[in-house]
Image (spheres, grey):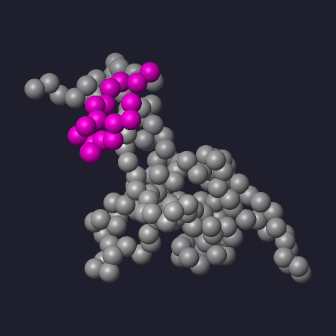
Amino acid sequence: MRPSWALDYDTATCSIAAALAIVGERSTFLVLREAFNGIRRFDDMQRRTGLPRQVLSNRLSRLVGEGILRKVPYREEGQRPRAEYRLTDKGIELFPVLVALMTWGDKYTAGSDGPSVRLTHSGCTAPVALELACTAGHVLASAREVTPLPGPGARRVA
């Protein structure tokens, strides 16, 4: 049996590695969780994530710099100007990633009482589920039904 074709290709252009360089830290996923839950203000995020202020500040700055969150100024009466953090379209496209992690966590790490959050469709209240499908419309049961092939950005190992 021949080893995987992947051994012949360099990983320098790997999209997974590039994405993880941006969002791959636990604290970043906690910030994204809060943003998807509608939490927009620094103090609320800090309280809910338990992250040190400097870590949270760094994560928010990075996500803003990457175009995943945007800062929206606000000012409460008698207070200094502050910013809320809102998801951009680029950020919203990370939702399936968080749902996939949540689904896996619900299956393998939830306590005996079950998961702490249920996702439902706001239009009909049915449970939300992720499906992997090909562009021809076939729903795939598992990763065993996927064949990775070199893409246009693949570079052979010298």
**Residue 119 on image: x %, y %:** 46, 65
**Residue 48 on image: x %, y %:** 56, 76
Instruction: Please report the residue visible at 34 percent of the width from the left and 36 percent of the height from the top.
Output: 138
**Within the magenta stretch, is there residue 1?**
no
**Within the magenta stretch, is there residue 143?**
yes
53 or 90: nearer the eye?
A: 90
**Residue 64 on image: x %, y %:** 67, 53
Where 93 sits versus 150, above or below? Answer: below
Instruction: Please report the residue visible at 73 percent of the width from the left and 65 percent of the height from the top.
Output: 84
113 or 55: nearer the eye?
A: 113
Drawn side of residue 61 relative to residue 2, left or right: right
User: What is the quadrant of residue 78 in the picture?
Assistant: bottom right
Drawn side of residue 107 relative to residue 46, left or right: left
Q: What segment is highlighted magenta in the picture?
A: 136-152
- Which image quarter holds the C terminus? top left
Magenta: predominant secondary structure element?
Answer: loop
Where 34 sits versus 47, above or below? Answer: above
User: What is the quadrant of residue 114 in the picture?
Assistant: bottom left
Instruction: Please report the residue visible at 52 percent of the width from the left and 50 percent of the height from the top.
Output: 94
Count up the numbered dots: 0
**Residue 144 on image: x %, y %:** 23, 40
- Asked if one can make out residue 61 in the rendered structure from this viewpoint, the answer is no
User: What is the quadrant of residue 74 in the picture?
Assistant: bottom right
61 or 78: nearer the eye?
A: 78
Drawn side of residue 16 relative to residue 41, left or right: left
Instruction: Please report the residue visible at 45 percent of the width from the left and 52 percent of the height from the top.
Output: 97
